[in-house]
């Protein structure tokens, strides 16, 4: 049995914002792709019907309005993600020294100033690694964040990666 891997510390607002923004984009990217496809189809329609003045005017209005709507939706989404990051970092679980996670063959033991608990490996449906953190998902949008900088030593990063792969596979 391998030695337990410990991570202790809290994310900063900027770290939380970067990670939540990346997750938000991953969830919304199909919407952005559909919007770009609509713009391309609209541009093709304008080019095709440009000889008829009334269709050209409608098409140009379409090409002006749709990007503005996409821009405002994107800015609103970024603002929501930033507010969520600030709320998340200010939550009671990160007060003081922040949570302490201990990973072993059974799962993860988490301890904060107010509570403690254990999460077994079957609870997580998938895991993702970024350059800054490991994200262990319980469901879409619900994940535990383990920052790599909070691990005890640099050798713990490949050890945790191997433990996650051995328990969750390629999920």
Image (tube, rainbow, N blue to C red):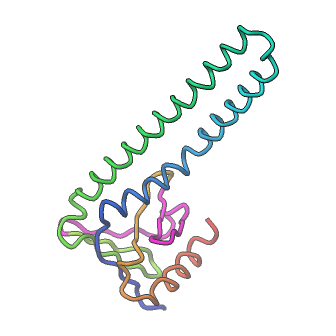
Q: Residue shown at 37%/43% (left/top)?
A: 79
Q: Residue shown at 30%/60% (left/top)?
A: 13
How many tags in the picture?
0
Q: Residue shown at 27%/51% (left/top)?
A: 87
Q: Residue shown at 78%/10% (left/top)?
A: 52
Stretch of the chain drawn in magenta: 113-138
Residue 33 in picture, x, y percent from top left: 65, 41
Q: Nearer the viewer, residue 128 or 2?
A: 128
Q: Nearer the viewer, residue 64 or 168?
A: 64
Q: Is residue 10 above or below residue 81?
A: below
Could you say which quadrant of the image residue 76 lies in? top left
Residue 139 in picture, x, y percent from top left: 49, 53
Residue 116 in picture, x, y percent from top left: 26, 69
Could you say which quadrant of the image residue 145 lies in? bottom left
Q: Is residue 91 left or right of residue 131?
A: left
Query: Is 83 covered by the magenta stretch?
Result: no
Q: Is residue 46 left or right of residue 167?
A: right
Q: Is residue 13 above or below residue 97?
A: above
């Amino acid at each position: 049995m391998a030695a337990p891997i410990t991570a202790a510390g809290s994310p900063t607002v900027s770290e939380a914002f970067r990670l939540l923004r990346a997750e938000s984009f991953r969830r919304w990217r199909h919407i952005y792709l559909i919007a770009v496809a609509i713009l391309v189809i609209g541009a093709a329609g304008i080019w095709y019907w440009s000889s008829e003045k009334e269709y050209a005017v409608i098409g140009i209005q379409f090409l002006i309005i749709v990007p503005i709507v996409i821009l405002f939706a994107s800015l609103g989404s970024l603002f929501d993600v930033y507010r969520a990051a600030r709320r998340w970092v200010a939550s009671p679980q990160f007060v003081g020294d922040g949570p302490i996670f201990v990973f072993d063959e059974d799962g993860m033991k988490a301890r904060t100033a107010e509570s403690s608990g254990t999460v077994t490996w079957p609870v997580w449906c998938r895991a993702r690694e970024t350059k800054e953190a490991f994200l262990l998902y319980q469901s879409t949008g619900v994940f535990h964040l383990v920052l790599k900088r909070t691990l005890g030593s640099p050798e713990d990063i490949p050890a945790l990666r191997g433990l996650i792969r051995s328990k969750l596979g390629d999920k």
